[in-house]
Amino acid sequence: MANTTKFWIAEVMKKLLSKKPIEKIRVTEICQEAGIERPTFYYHFKDKYDLMAWIVFQCSLDTDITDLTSATKAMEQMKKDLIFYKRAFEDNSQDPMWQYMLDLSIRRHNQIVMDKLQCDQLDVQTEFSIRMYCYGALGISREWILNDDFTSAKTIVTMMFKAMPDDLKKILFEDMS
């Protein structure tokens, strides 16, 4: 039941975002539109940015970020949800949405690399390579969503994989060499 409510609130947020930017949306408005009380919203999310982050996280759950086909499919879905991602990337509030997306990407990459290396802490160079790659990949994704109507998702993902630092490629794609 709790997940059903979260997904309902997320759908309402996407609907509201199709009409106006996130900074113009209030939690009260989300609650009214969803037909829920404020405590219900705050039971599931700490604020509207947490809700946006949860939406992004849900969208990323089925994505294998080390697989060209899976990553391409996720980027194609971003284009299908263009208004949502444009609003997310245009957000320049105190805690911009891109920062949530960056943190999520870094955490996911860290976990994947730790799993591959069978360790619970990464060395400084590997952490740096992950951060550098995630900043670049997110920056290019943002630019692609906001300004590029021509380049295919597959081309973007292929270029991101090629631009990945060699030490990170070696870890993530070692069994593909």
Image (tube, rainbow, N blue to C red):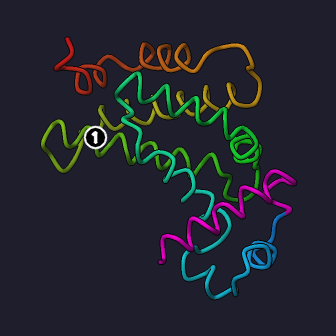
Residue 65 versus residue 20 in the image, above or below: above
Nearer to the camera, 41 or 126: 41
Q: Is residue 19 magenta?
A: yes
Residue 111 versus residue 69 in the image, above or below: below
Residue drawn 58% across and 35% down?
77
**Location of mark 1 (residue):** 112
Report whether 142 appears left or right of 175.
Answer: right
Residue drawn 77% across and 24% down?
147
- Disc 1 is placed on an element classified as helix
Residue 66 locus on image (x, y percent): 34, 29
Q: Quadrant of residue 169?
A: top left
Q: Is residue 145 magenta?
A: no
Prevailing SS of the magenta stretch: helix
Residue 170 locus on image (x, y percent): 24, 20
Q: Quadrant of residue 22?
A: bottom right
Query: Looking at the picture, which amino acid does disc 1 mark?
Result: Ile
Residue drawn 68% across and 52% down?
96
Residue drawn 80% across and 71% down?
26
Magenta stretch, residue numbers? 1-24
